[in-house]
Image: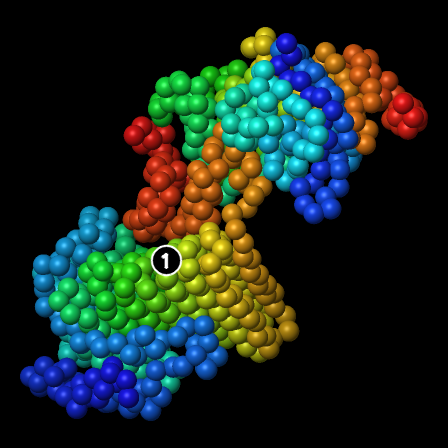
Amino acid sequence: MALLEIQNLHARVAAAGGREILKGVNLSIGRGEVHAIMGKNGSGKSTLCQVLAGRETYEVTQGTVTYNGRDLLEESAEERARDGIFLAFQYPVEIPGVSTSYFLKAAVNAIRKHRGEQELDAMQFLKLVKEKQALLGIEQSFMNRAVNEGFSGGEKKRNEVFQMAVVNPMLGLLDETDSGLDIDALKVVANGVNKLHQQDKDRAILLVTHYQRLLNYVVPDFVHVMIDGRIVKSGGKDLALKLEDQGYEWLEAEASQPA
Amino acid sequence: MTQLEEQTMMNLSNLSRLSRGDGRQRPWIDEVRRGAIERFEKVGFPSVKEEAWRFTNVSPIAQSTFALGEGALTESARQVSEQYGFGIEAAAELVFINGIYQPELSRAGKLGSGVRIGSLEAAIEEDVPEVRQHLTRHARIDGNPFVALNSGFLRDGAFVRIGRGVRVSGPIHLIFVSDAASQSTVSHPRVLIVAGEGSDSQIVESYVGTPGGRYFTNAVTEIVAARDSRIDHCRLQQESLEAFHVATMQVVQDEASNVISQAATLGGKLTRNDLNVILNGEYAESTLNGLVVIGGDQHVDNHTLLHHEKANCPSHELYKYVLDDRATGVFRGKIFVQQDAQKTNAKQNSKSLLLSDDARINAMPALEIYADDVKCTHGSTTGPVDEDMVFYLRTRGVGLDAARHLLTYAFAADITRRIKVVPVRRRLEDFMAAQHGLPQDLRITDLGSHDEAAR
């Protein structure tokens, strides 16, 4: 059974007269698989990530999402996180006044508690942080700074991947984690994702991206193209190259054909 | 005539009770008192019809009966002073009961030559030149009826003089305890701080009282900052939730002085703070930060007035309110930039976090600019906890309630982390953490936070 099974998912902005953004998404992600969703701005890629993570500003109007055999849509955002879903934000939020170390320890312990595991004390947490730093080769200088505050775009994205490593999810959703990064930062982020994937063969990754560039470093098992709230084409990693080469027009033409 | 006014009159006719009648009092101070009482008699308590008092109705004060608080050292007052003391973290700690200095509870410390801290009454009697020069000269009785009332009842309080070029390490802590254990009391604490040229000091005023006590504290502080001096001033108001607290702080800054005012209001049923700063020399710098954390039916009104009189002065102002239940807040911040004050750089901001649908804030920023080459900005935001931040925390496994508590803490921490006076910062952070069921290892600034965290 797939880890994540999305069927005919429709979602709209949760407000009176809110626009429908997802118009019937079907997607199946197995354990250990790396999927990439590509598409233009406004195609619904980020909305899909947010809906999967439990954002209440979107309302699911139709369809089902099954995660690990359970109805994901019944769960709150924090329950999903505790059950192993992690969203790396496109725009990580700054939280002045809360230290990164406190924030991360609270996250790790909320998840551990939920799983019936012993909460980590300060020393154990510090050990975990050091392990993950070593794993990712990331110098973690900001544990004692406020969450994301004053971080550059690259630092924020790196911090997202680092958080993912620390909370150790089953399914990582990376929402345009590559956008706005220079090539060096991109390599650091991609290397982190690869390490996490290698470390746990069951861990699945869903990358949402504009560009093929990231896929040079993180090789996906499947590539999907999203247009106007639907996945219109799926294929292997070659599909990304074709999109890079030919753009989305040929698919848009295909998508607008009546089924 | 209201009861307090009646009492005022009664006490006026018995002014000799205020002076000790041993012939050492100074006639000039009697004249000041008399003039102030006359002023108060003439204007009385302010009404909500006056613009400056529109959102703060002081009739509960005017209609209550308060006995003029005595300076007797009681067990209840001693306990309160110990509870709020900083202990060895303070360079010196002075305790006042109902505004009267308590040598038995105080520790004056050794602060260096040219430093004098202690009873204001004693300094008046000794005719210390700075007292004669500055006391009642800056906080004007015609500006605010409560200043007139305080000056009319002026007896004791704190006198702090930091000598020329002296750097005091560690905060000087002034603890004002209102003792209303046996009856409802009124006190009029008075503080005069004179910072000499090039001096550097941290001064903390704490206002506290017997728990549940119904009393009225009417405080006035005057601060005179000489050239190149630096004062880090904190004001911690943690009065009883039944108390009324009205305070005026008047700051006068000379050339290149730097005054930082951090005012935290946590207690009191009804609070009105007036903070007036005059930047009276070039390159003087002023920072006004405020934090209000209230709930229930508490009301807090902060008025700040910043006068840019001279050129090249920067000022920074940030006031933050956390309002729960039916609490109401008022912020009125005015910045005057006079014609001579070219190259002024003034920033003002107020932010309010509303934790309930019934909490209210009235924020009124205002700029009045007569110079043409200045940079002035002001802003004001009000709203509930930021939902983007809540969602971010929830996607990391933190529950909804815990996320809201954490973000409320973080909102206030934006002010507390700017406070360099360590015991004040810690007290506020601990207060917020306790209020929100959070551990104390949230602190950003403590490098040892990991080690502390095992609880």
Q: Is residue B247 left or right of residue B82?
A: right
Q: Quadrant of residue A252?
A: top right
Question: Image quadrant for the N terminus of chain B?
Answer: bottom left
In the picture of the structure, the residue carrying the numbered disc 1 is B296
Above or below residue B352? Residue B32 is: below
Residue B130: x %, y % from top left: 26, 75
Q: Is residue A162 left or right of residue A254?
A: left
How did the renderer colour the structure? rainbow
- Which residue appears farthest toward the left when viewing the image? B22
Residue B293: x %, y % from top left: 39, 55
Three-letter amino acid code at the position of disc 1? Gly
Q: Residue at x 57, y 63 (%)?
A: B378
Above or below residue A76? Residue A165 is: above
Along the line of sight, which residue is nearer the eye, A48 or B316?
Answer: A48
Instruction: Please tell me whether mark 1 sits on a helix, a strand or a loop.
Output: loop
Above or below residue B108? Residue B196 is: below
Q: Is residue B52 left or right of residue A170?
A: left
Is residue A161 among what the camera can see?
no
Along the line of sight, which residue is nearer the eye, B383 or A164?
Answer: B383
Along the line of sight, which residue is nearer the eye, A11 or B13?
Answer: A11
Q: Is residue B320 left or right of residue A91?
A: left
Q: Residue at x 23, y 51 (%)?
A: B86
Say which chain tag 1 marks: B
Q: Quadrant of residue B217?
A: bottom left
